[in-house]
Image: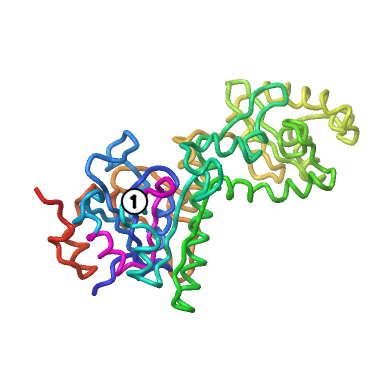
Amino acid sequence: MRERGGTGPLTGVRVVELAGIGPGPFATMLLGDLGADVVRVDRPGGPGLGIEPCRDVTGRNKRSVLLDLKTDAGRKAVLGLVERAHVLIEGYRPGVAERLGVGPEECLRRNPALVYGRMTGWGQDGPLAPRAGHDIGYLALTGALGLSGAADGPPHFPANLLGDYAGGSLYLVVGVLAALHHAREHGEGQVVDAAIVDGASHLTAMLHGMLAAGAWQDARGVNLLDGGSPFYGVYETADGGHMAVGALEERFYAEFTRLLGLDEETADRSDIGNWGALRAAVAERFRSRTRAEWAEVFAGSDACVAPVLSLREAPAHPHLAARGTFTEHSGITQPAPAPRFSRTPGAVRTAPAQPGADTESVARDWGIDPVTLAIPT
């Protein structure tokens, strides 16, 4: 049986992805970036993000077969892949995989060393487990959503990065890799239950410690790291752009106020009661120049100030360009694989997978009869 994948640290690891949207595909993209051979099982007619598959970056470094899991032939084909896989990832509501005949019990019976990764918002149990949901709702219940935004306004949400990807995908990948290590050491597979509500809650660990110590108020926009302090926040510039300020430590703050042009008396931050006036002074100074002008002022300093860039602007920033943080592949500018490895680097090897386009190569490399991976016509 041939091994397919990249040169990354997960080369030789075979992953079956039961196609979905959101955190599951992002997690398998990350595994593929690290060298795993990811075979996505697409179903006729979806799911999809409403964009062409060729532009869905989360489909890179994967291959696709098209199977109808609602048929006996489709179920048997998936189980045939499972027998040869190290990892399976699914993001269905609880009970769906079982009803399709590809749940943990059936898959682990076929392959006792399999790592069965389950990605959901609410988890596999609990009162909300069977309910629909999305990133913003999961964050709402964990307290994470309420952390961001002005004290006198509604909470802000950073697209679906904090819930789906940070609290979901990354925790799923950590769990899968830990379970994979155990499986290789002991020959025992297991189920990884990755719920966004669990991961997002876990991300707030430090803040719960600060809350218990009295160093964090259970309110928005009044704390050191949530916009409550005038030296940790975002300020508008003369041209409608913004600058991000994170001058927490004393020596960084001194550099910040010097370059901003605040006099010593105005810059004094020792009295929290004066923070309102200090914030107004900082805001006034930033409004006096454009974003580009302020970026030049703070360039090369330790003031901990950076321009707020858009998605299209970010790849061209000199630091990100020098590191190759973004890459061009298949006509799409996209983030390069992360993190980086000195001996086994990951890479963007292939364009986003097209549904059903890789039946022959998957059958050949995984040692499966190609007829079993084809939907009857």
Task: Classify 10 Å Cα crowding around label 1: few (below 14), some (14-19), many (20 and above).
Answer: few
Residue 81 sits in which quadrant? bottom left
Identify the image quadrant of the N terminus: bottom left
**Percent of width and height locating residue 310:** 50, 33
x and y percent of residue 232 in the render? Answer: 72, 36
Residue 302 pos. (x, y %):
71, 46
- Front one among 156 and 238: 156
Left or right: 347 as drawn, with respect to 293: left
* Residue with the most extreme bottom position: 186
* Position of residue 223 in the picture relative to residue 178 (left or right): right
Q: Please state if 340 lies on the left or on the right of 14 as rendered.
A: right
Q: Give the quadrant of residue 238.
A: top right
Judge whether 120 appears above or below 221 on screen: below
Residue at image location 32% in from the left, 33% down from the top: 50
Amino acid on which the number 1 mark rests in the picture: Arg
**What scheme was used to colour the molecule?**
rainbow
- Residue 319 shows in this picture: no
Q: Is residue 91 magenta?
A: yes
User: 80 or 175, which lies in front?
Assistant: 80
Q: Is residue 85 magenta?
A: yes
Residue at the spot of label 1: 99
- From the top left corner, tell me how far across and down residue 109 is, in percent: 36, 69
Residue 87 appears in the picture as rendered: yes
Which portion, as a residue range, is magenta?
76-96
Give the secondary structure at mark 1. Answer: helix
